Amino acid sequence: MLSKRCALVGGVILAACLATPLSPAAADPAPQSASPAPPSVIDALERDLGLTEEQVVTRLANEERAAAVESSLTAQLGASFGGAWLNDDASKLMVATTDPNATAAIEAQGAQPVLVKRTLAELNAVLQKLDQAPRKATAAATLWYVDVKTNSVSVQAPTVEAADALATAAGVDKSVITVSATAEKPMTFIDIIGGMPFYIGSSRCSVGFSVTRGTTPGFVTAGHCGRTGARTTNPTGTFQGSSFPGNDYAWVAAPGNTPRPWVRGSGGANVIVRGSTQAAVGASICRSGSTTGWRCGTIQQHNATVRYAQGTVNGLTRTSACAQPGDSGGSFISGSQAQGVTSGGSGNCSIGGTTYHQPVNEILSAYSLTLTTG
């Protein structure tokens, strides 16, 4: 198999020219600068596109040639250029133009001319108007983009009415727009790891531990980081529950992100979380936060009551591991066992300090959460 793969990769351009050339046949030699695709890329495309190895190699060669042809024709067609795209099997480059006299130039480079009403510049101008529409109108839509295949700008939203409202608010020519309803809900995809930062508006706190509630992923953190209903970014989520003072815990649902059984350790290495058995007084303990990173100490007391300026919090664990602002909510772990989320403390990591954490098992119980473990 290895020798076959090497032979195919090495012959990528030859295979393409024999199969489906994108420029006039016999005359053009294979480009000498073509870079063979790594075997890992070929394997992945076989798997995800449902192609054979030979089909992948041919496709990649055609795509490489198409990119060069598109670049050339974009410059050659100038203002009449309407966009370009590959057909389904990537055997032919389709090039749109508003100028009927440009078809010969397109064909001369082995591409298929498509006559359209609007140039790519005109479509991009419509898209820019949509981008600049009032926030209320854009918030109700899901996505909008230039669709070169239909020579239009597509607007999609949960309902057709919402998509149409965005086009109206932007003041664009609706003959250029296609609107449709979609169930798609784009969101960011972030690994949720203990100690990493997250943001509530302009404020920053730290992730405690990855959790799930049913099938919904999320994380636990400190209650003073946000009230119920507050929105987070990086990862995107919503505070589903928050208690402070009295307690200092919260959980954030972050659908679309990936909960990981890790805490960010020394030098960014991942420390695996295997459970949440409480460690004894005197045991070593480390904490991870987005300001001071990985810091360690020992457990001094359990079940401490702390009086903050905002009010009293009961049932905290006191440790000698230092912390600073921004570390709030971050992970405390002893060995591989999750212990709690950073609540507060005194001192800092320059001159030493004392910290308090909210025990994680209380948070899991309060919100019926499952700790993500490895």
Image (cartoon, rainbow, N blue to C red):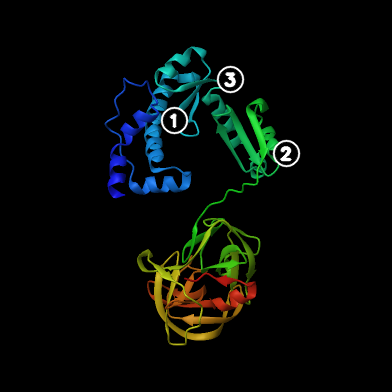
Q: Which mark is residue 293?
A: none
Q: Residues within 10 Å of mark 3 (few under 14, many from 20)?
A: some
Asked if residue 283 lies left or right of residue 185, the reply is left
Asked whether 173 or 307 is in front, the reply is: 173
Question: Amino acid under label 2?
Answer: Glu
Badge 3 is on which residue?
A: 117
Q: CA distance from mark 2 to mark 3?
A: 26 Å
What residue is drawn where x is 62% and y is 43%? Answer: 142
- x, y (%) of residue 257? 54, 58
Question: Amino acid under label 1?
Answer: Ser
**Foreground disc of the pair 2, 1:** 1
- x, y (%) of residue 344? 51, 74
What residue is drawn where x is 31% and y is 49%? Answer: 1
What residue is drawn where x is 52% and y is 25%? Answer: 121
Badge 1 is on which residue?
A: 91
Question: Amino acid under label 3?
Answer: Lys
Asked if residue 148 lies left or right of residue 243, the reply is left
